[in-house]
Image: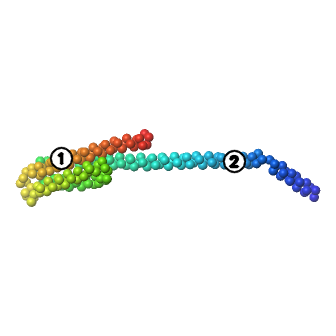
Amino acid sequence: MTNDLQRIAETVQQIALESHVSFWAKGDFWIAFVLGVVGIAVGIVGVYYSVKAFVEAKEAKIAAKAAGRLVKYQTTTYELIDLLKPLASPSMQITFSTARDTLADTTHKLFRIISTFEHEADIADKIAALRSALDNAQKSLDGVRPTGTSKEGDAPYAVYNAIEKDFSTISNMIGELQGLFEKKTVNLGGDNATATGK
């Protein structure tokens, strides 16, 4: 029994000695402290990279939208070039049906192309003027409409004389729009390079 009492006494003495030792003098405190500091540091680094990734994703989204607009402007420029060909120099022997089909095809394609850009302030007035020129061309063409297919040859050059000025005006306006889109492409390309830091 004395052995048991001795062991209990030794244990009580050891506990008393350990309770007088400061908690920071123990190894387990320092392990927990270092792990806590490392955890905080890892958390701060994680937040930094999360914020950095968010900012870069936002910049990438802006750059992607700008690239999309750039491609749309370039595509529109090429489509406008294709529309100029039939309007640039109509034949003096052009028939009413050929002029009507050319004007209808051009009007259809132009409305499809320009409908995307009607809300842009720097282009809206040009589009309105172009719509007006297309209406004038249709009125001029209606003024020389033959009463029958056999009457189409009765007044040579009548269709040409009626539409030549209107086709020229439409052609010039398309060329002006083409120039505006080319300018937007150049400006947007410069803005895009600046925005992405290149």
Counting from the top left corner in percent of width and height, residue 156 is at 7, 51
Q: Quadrant of the C terminus?
A: top left
Residue at the location (6% across, 53% down)? Answer: 155
Residue at coordinates 26% horizontally, 46% vertically from top-left?
Answer: 177
Local crowd size for mark 1, using a 10 Å CA cut-off: few (<14), some (14–19), many (≥20)? some
Residue 13: assigned label: none
* Residue 175 picture quarter: top left
- Give the amino acid type for the residue marked by disc 2 in the picture: Phe
Residue 2 to residue 85: above or below:
below
Q: Percent x, y for residue 31? A: 71, 47
Outermost left residue: 154
Residue topped by disc 2: 33
Q: Is residue 126 left or right of residue 191?
A: left
Count the labels in the image. Answer: 2
Q: Nearer the viewer, residue 49 or 131?
A: 131
Secondary structure category for the residue under label 1: helix
Residue 83: horizontal and vertical position, in percent? 23, 49
Residue 26 spot, x, y in % from top left: 76, 47
Q: Which residue is located at x 11 percent, y 47 percent?
A: 92
| Among numbered discs 1 and 2, the one appearing first in the sequence | 2
Going by the numbered disc 1, the residue's amino acid type is Ser
| Residue that protrudes farthest toward the right in the picture | 2
**Residue 73 visible somewhere in the drawing:** yes
Q: How is the image coloured?
A: rainbow
Residue 27 seen anywhere in this rendered image of the structure: no
At 93% across and 58% down in the image, what residue appears?
A: 1
Disc 2 residue crowd, few under 14, some 14–19, many 20+, Cα 10 Å = few
Residue 148 located left or right of residue 113: left
Residue occupying the far bottom of the picture? 148
Horizontal placement of 147 versus 77: left or right? left
Task: Return the residue at label 1.
Answer: 168
